[in-house]
Amino acid sequence: MVKDINPGGHDSVSDEIVALGNGTAVFAAWDFSRGIELWAMNGTASGTTAVKRINPDMGAELPRLESTGDGRALFWGKDSPAQHWYEHRIVQPWITDGTSAGTHVIKENAPELKYPFNPKAEGSGENGRAVFVADDGTHGYEPWVSDGTSAGTHMVVDLRPGTAGSEPMGFVSNGSGKTMFSADDGVHGRGAWVTDGTAAGTCMLKDMSSGENVHALGWDFDSVAIGGGLVLFNAADPAGHRSPWITDGTSVGTHLLRHFVPGSDGAESGNYAAAPSPAPGASH
């Protein structure tokens, strides 16, 4: 054990650990003196410390952290306490390098992003930026991007015009500047999408609501980057049988790998994870 953050037999709930790539990791943890706050660690007890007091509400949640791929991580915090756990909270995007001086609000003087009490803060990051999902109170949940600056934090594109939102899910970076995810534009159903963080570079890879082999992605967008710019993901045919697909971030490079039809053993694909291998792109 590195450190007993919350002494006395109580959990510190130190999950959502994100490596910054410089020997330091950041995570959210709970103790009775601070509540849930941002912590950093380097693998030693003395190097495991609370970074900065961000949430004045002892019961506040610190949403998911996302690495930007350059020694920093994006996360969401709030600087005013909630009256009730179920109320809509106003939170702001923050950036951290694991130090107090390097942890600050990104859009301090800009309209705040509004989330429900359980923010949708999943995303993926590389090349000094993070792609994530947010609702600005006008467009519904849509893909956003941030490079850690106020000017560089904005909605990528309104995929589903209006207040409903396209509800992006399952962001995964392919390691080559593209982020894949699932979204519903209100026309094609839930399909596979890709973005490079710009409106011009955001498009549907495949219409997963129709076609010969695929009926739906599902909400989770079970996927994993396997190297070489490739992402393996899971999709279901009209009968509900889930099979593996592969994409390189282009429409022509997105296709079914193998059609699994469950037999008596109920075999089908899912729960993907990249496998350590000397061969680039190998996975199990």
Image (cartoon, helix red, strand yellow):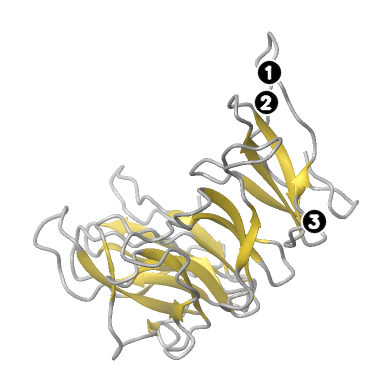
Determine if residue 275 is in view.
Answer: no
**Label 3 sits on what residue type?**
Gly
Quadrant assignment for the C terminus: top right
Contact between labelled residues 1 and 2, with CB atoms less than 8 Å apart: yes
From the viewer's perspective, is 93 left or right of 237? Answer: left
**Label 1 sits on what residue type?**
Pro
Mark nearer the N terminus (2 vs 3): 3
Q: Quadrant of residue 201?
A: bottom right
- Residue 231 percent across, percent down from the top left: 72, 53
Please tell me whether mark 2 sits on a helix, a strand or a loop: loop
- Residue 183 percent across, percent down from the top left: 51, 55
Q: Nearer the viewer, mark 2 or mark 3?
A: 3
Tell me the residue at 21%/65% (across/down). 89
From the viewer's perspective, is 268 left or right of 146? Answer: right
**Label 2 sits on what residue type?**
Glu
Residue assigned mark 2? 268
Mark nearer the N terminus (2 vs 1): 1
* 237 and 83: which is toward the camera: 237
* 67 and 153: which is toward the camera: 153
Real-space CA distance between mark 2 and mark 1, rounded to the nearest whole angstrom: 6 Å
Please tell me whether mark 3 sits on a helix, a strand or a loop: loop
* 110 and 164: which is toward the camera: 164
Q: Residues within 10 Å of mark 3 (few under 14, many from 20)?
A: few
Residue assigned mark 1? 262
Please tell me whether mark 1 sits on a helix, a strand or a loop: loop
Tell me the residue at 56%/62% (across/down). 43
Q: Residues within 10 Å of mark 2 (few under 14, many from 20)?
A: some
Residue assigned mark 3? 253
Mark nearer the N terminus (1 vs 3): 3
